[in-house]
Image (cartoon, rainbow, N blue to C red):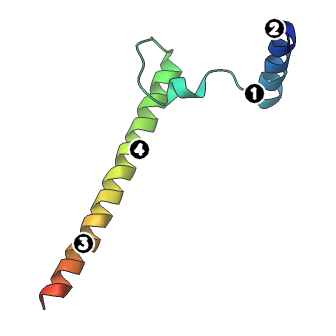
Amino acid sequence: MSHHDRDAEIAAFIRTNGVTRCPTACAVATQGSPDLADQAALEQYSSAREELLRTKSATRWQIFGSFRLRNRA
């Protein structure tokens, strides 16, 4: 596949799928300076991920705590 064919195929994919930026650029903090909308999206993603991890952790502790109490009796 030539560079021209490859570039045309990538451009067609982007047009049909609406991809406007690299999805990984919004998933983790970077060294670059993303625009304000991307910074807000990254902050929201980070907050939601932290909340999910806290919820999972609390649920696990509840399960293990109740298991330990039942085995003492």
Label 1 to label 3: alpha-carbon separation:
45 Å
The answer to whether residue 47 is above or below residue 8 is: below
Pointer 1 residue:
18
Label 4 to label 1: alpha-carbon separation:
25 Å
Q: Earlier in the sequence, mark 4 or mark 1?
A: 1
Residue 38's disc is: none
Comparing labels 2 and 4, the label whose residue is closer to the camera: 2
Q: Mark 4, residues whose alpha carbon is within 10 Å: few (<14), some, or many (≥20)?
A: few
Please tell me which residue lies in front, 4 or 64: 4
| Quadrant of the snapshot with the N terminus | top right
Left or right, residue 42 beside residue 60: right
Amino acid at circle 4: Arg
Q: Earlier in the sequence, mark 1 or mark 2?
A: 2
Pointer 3 residue:
64
Q: Residue at x 41, y 31 (%)?
A: 43
Q: Residue 52 location, x and y as percent?
A: 39, 51
| Quadrant of the snapshot with the C terminus | bottom left
Q: Earlier in the sequence, mark 3 or mark 2?
A: 2
Comparing labels 3 and 2, the label whose residue is closer to the camera: 2
Comparing labels 1 and 3, the label whose residue is closer to the camera: 3
Pointer 2 residue:
3
Q: Secondary structure at mark 2?
A: helix
Amino acid at circle 1: Gly
Q: Earlier in the sequence, mark 2 or mark 4?
A: 2
Label 2 to label 4: alpha-carbon separation:
39 Å
Q: Mark 2, residues whose alpha carbon is within 10 Å: few (<14), some, or many (≥20)?
A: few
Amino acid at circle 3: Phe
Label 3 to label 4: alpha-carbon separation:
23 Å
Q: Residue at x 45, y 11 (%)?
A: 33
